[in-house]
Amino acid sequence: MLKVTNLESFYGAVQAVWNVSFDVSPGEVVSIIGTNGAGKTTILKSIVGLTAHTGSVRFKDQEIGHLPAHKMAELGIAYVPEGRKVFPQMTVLENLRMGSYNKRAAKFREESIAHILDTFPRLKERAGNMAGNLSGGEQQMLAIGRGLASKPSLLLLDEPSLGIAPILVDEIFETIQKMKKNITIVLVEQHVHHALSIADKGYVIEHGKVAISGTGKQLQENEHVKAAYLGL
Ligand code: ATP
């Protein structure tokens, strides 16, 4: 579904990612973990054309590394950036509609919004509320819901648990686990325990490079991961 090969990413003259390769098969959850500043966000931004990079990014056998970010929704890739950037002055429903303006998604708009509201019952209860009045966790659910409204086959999620009350973090991860039946997910997360529990595969990024990779279970049992990321 997604194959990233020898990715190198740059902010002007500063290189942030070195020789990163990974692949994601249909229906998998792939977690990318690492400390602050390791390069995780940069990897996602490079995939969707928001950061200068070299190397190859293939989606469903098409090279997309050269495409601009606005083409991604048409292709079936949704990127939910960190920091839950919802439209605060619009209602929950309006935010979800904003997610479905690409040609492919527009045909199924009402049906997919109904499905998203079933997936996130909290959003259903607050469908008419201004997004700016939702809690942090609810705004994160809305940001994910808006990504889903574009009917993606690949969802890139950046730090969905950041700054969210623990009970909602659990709820968000449960929902991600349910979603994986229908959608392929790349998850960047500092909540390593959660991220590896739901991952088919995981990649540990350190100083812009892949330091360790394996199945979610292998990484949970890896001594370095346990000591450096799981506090064990
Ligand atoms: P975080 O969880 O804090 O977002 P991360 O692993 O996602 O961490 P990145 O945000 O990808 O890390 O950052 C990787 C490196 O690139 C860091 O050294 C960071 O300082 C640098 N960087 C990120 N964004 C920019 C930018 N816009 N301009 C210059 N350097 C940047």
Image (spheres, helix red, strand yellow):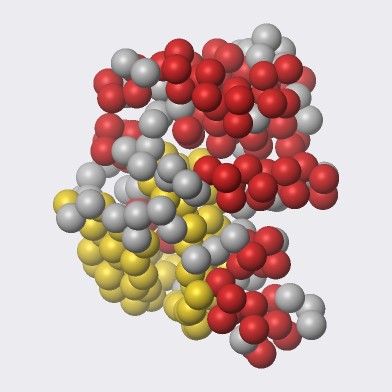
Position of the N terminus by quadrant: bottom left
**Does residue 188 lie above or below 171 as drawn?**
below
Q: Is residue 159 above or below residue 115?
A: below
- Identified at 62% across, 18% down, the residue is 92
State which quadrant residue 119 falls in. Answer: top right
Q: Position of residue 139 (x, y in %)?
A: 68, 31
Residue 44 can be seen, yes or no: no
Q: Is residue 68 left or right of residue 108?
A: left
Residue 89, image x and y in percent?
A: 64, 14
Left or right for 206, reference 84:
left
Q: Residue at x 36, y 70 (%)?
A: 22
173 above or below 108?
Answer: below
Q: Residue at x 55, y 13 (%)?
A: 94
Q: Quadrant of residue 129?
A: top right
User: Outermost residue, bottom direction?
Assistant: 223
In the rendered image, the quadrant that contains the C terminus is bottom right
- Left or right of 232 on screen, residue 39: left
State the image coordinates of residue 47 (x, y, percent, origin top left): 35, 54
Residue under the image location 43 percent in, 45 percent down: 183
In front of the other: 73 or 108: 108
Q: For this view, does 33 lie left or right of residue 129? A: left
